[in-house]
Amino acid sequence: MSTPSIARPAGLIAGLKERARSEWGRRVGLLLLFLAALAFPLIDRNEGDIDAVANALAFAILALGLNIVVGFAGLLDLGYAAFFAIGAYTYGIFSSYQVQPEWSSFWVPFEYLGLVAHNTANGRDLVHFTVSFWLMLPVSALVAAFFGVLFGAPTLRLKGDYLAIVTLGFGEIVPIVARNTPYLTNGAQGLNGVQSPTLFGYTFGVASAPYYYLGLLLLVMLILISTRLKDSRVGRAWLAIREDEIAAEAMGVDRTRLKLLAFGIGAAFGGMTGTFYVAKLQTATPEMFGFPVSVMLLVMIVLGGTGSVAGVVVGTLILQLLQSWFLQDLTQWTHALGRMTGIGVLERVDLVQSIELIFGIILVVMMLYRRQGLIPERQSVKALSLDQQAATPSRGGIKVELGPIHRKTVDRNRPLLEVRGLSRSFGGIQAVKNLDLTVMPGSIVAVIGPNGSGKTTFFNLITGLMPPSGGKVTFAGEDITGLGPHQIVERGIARTFQNLRLFANMTVMENALVGAHTRTTTGPMGAVLRPPGVKREELAARARVLEVLGIFGNRLMPRIEHLARTLSYANRRRLEISRALVSEPQLLLLDEPTAGMNPTETLELTDQIRGLRERGVTILLIEHKLNVVNEIADEVIVLDHGEKIAEGSPAEVQRNEEVLRAYLGRTATAGAPAAS
């Protein structure tokens, strides 16, 4: 679909240019930082220092994996070290002498491939696994991802504290299994003699520098992967789930699949790091992967900034080097001070052994005084100019060039939405009772009724957020009863909410782009590799968002880089409508769209809703402002205690005695009901 040209404010263009300049400066800074990292082993020849930084790099990679789970998708995982252990033991078992089955002809092809060697010990022919480290890096990642998905499938339907408790249990189970399977892991004594990597005939051995450079390479690669995933269709879906699972699914995000994807990718990072770490140490014991490791990683993420890729790396390096370098030196200085002053406590203190206490203090301080971390996920944006802030309400509907809202052909002679006998009960309370409704294409149908009459529950049943107790919902001739919210959005139904459900810590642009989730196809591989097709899809989605935001003129366009939580209430309403429109709906469900708007803004939005109908969108709305209903509704449905008590034109409904009784508690002699 061709995209019409869009007039963008001059301030927006200037902002984009400024952002491009800052991006260029940031890239230059990152290049200089990378060159300094490459030069570090050449400047500091101390093997202990290089080894400490190599260990810090390994934990930075681990923290990046956990950040995908906790920071991006908002899933509190207290057992992440389990995937670290799975990766370590996967490589350790296949590169040491722990597992040596009997030799047979079965192993000959594997010997030819260099995966095993024929070994003789005590007169027995045995198999010695010699799987390459470079092969095991991706294999360990896949093995850990498999266990991540296997563990996540039955548990990721849990939320909050319940999910944290289950992950904590999983994190404790893996070291226990390692401790109690000596034929695979050598039990509590651990694997020894793990083969070090070899590259072009050079064996890494126990030297620190090769592992430093390998860790640096892996870190850069996984920073790139994390950044590209976050700034993609997949990453936006994760952030939406983190902010509001219900709203994310109502916008077309399959939250179960996306959570599993986050868990699997995060586990893959952990598995790969485990292989790197065990190859570096050439040993693996169960104590290396206990609960303190998971807690330490969480502290690193909180310190750096939850969800911030750069912050997580910086936080990890600070805490690891604090533990490896500074605490040892500080302990020695404290002992020296104790000897000088004669204070015995200072002579006995060991700060290195108190690292968990120090981590706990850091966690408490960050939660109290800087929850966003050292490098916040979101950076501040430039304040709007007076011209950008100025917005005058006007009549006349949609004044920008706007292509078709959706690309589907609608049969105008057949009902678009049919509801038959729809019911929903909560225990003994009947929220919706045997409701029938027909919505024809191109119409505006209003649903009104007193508070608690079942209007929002009715919307929830149509959009799949609640399963009906009975009845049937048909959309465009297809039975959609019982489908998930994301499946219903795919078919062409979008909605807003009575109580705003925006993604508060995402920008206006990102909020609206989530609406395009079902109309785009980029997966994690495409997000990382970014082939031309993916770039075109992303550009088209962003152009579509700008086109839709343009409906509301100067209200949202200058604020596309602002967080949703910083918008005024009326602009949040407009953004929620825009987000729904980006999903290309045939049927748009608006739940009290003019709530919180003044009379002038209400009239402006009323004209814009009428303009959407003129562009092929069928509207079903809940509205308490009866002047709005009278002006734009073709048909009005009145609900009371979950039952339909009236149906007809606005004029007919206003004269209905049952409607007057529901609103005013008396008969029609009192005249038409006042707007509530």
Image (cartoon, rainbow, N blue to C red):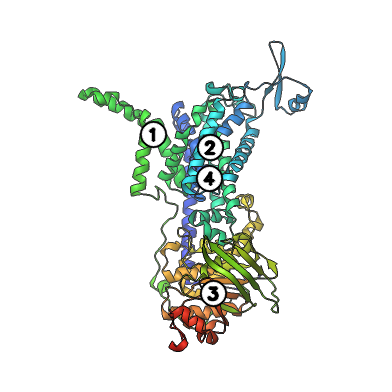
Q: Which residue is mark 4?
A: 223
Q: CA distance from mark 2 to mark 3?
A: 46 Å
Q: Nearer the viewer, mark 1 or mark 2?
A: 2
Which residue does the image show at 67% across and 76% down from the upper left? 415
Residue 663 placed where, x, y %? 45, 79
The disc, 2 or 3, on the residue closer to the chain's N-terminal end is 2
SS for callout 2: helix
The relative height of residue 9 versus residue 245 in the rendered view (above or below) is below
Q: Which residue is mark 2?
A: 170
Q: Nearer the viewer, mark 1 or mark 3?
A: 3
Q: CA distance from mark 1 to mark 2?
A: 21 Å
The disc, 1 or 2, on the residue closer to the chain's N-terminal end is 2
Q: Is residue 654 visible?
A: yes
The disc, 4 or 2, on the residue closer to the chain's N-terminal end is 2
Q: CA distance from mark 4 to mark 2?
A: 27 Å
Of 365 and 47, the residue lying toward us? 365
Q: CA distance from mark 4 to mark 1?
A: 27 Å
Tally the marks. 4
Quarter location, residue 94:
top right
Instruction: Single out the residue that lies furthest toward the top.
Output: 122
Q: Which residue is mark 1?
A: 356
The relative height of residue 222 versus residue 278 in the rendered view (above or below) is below
In the image, 410: left or right of 653? Answer: right
Which residue does the image show at 51% across and 40% down from the upper left? 167
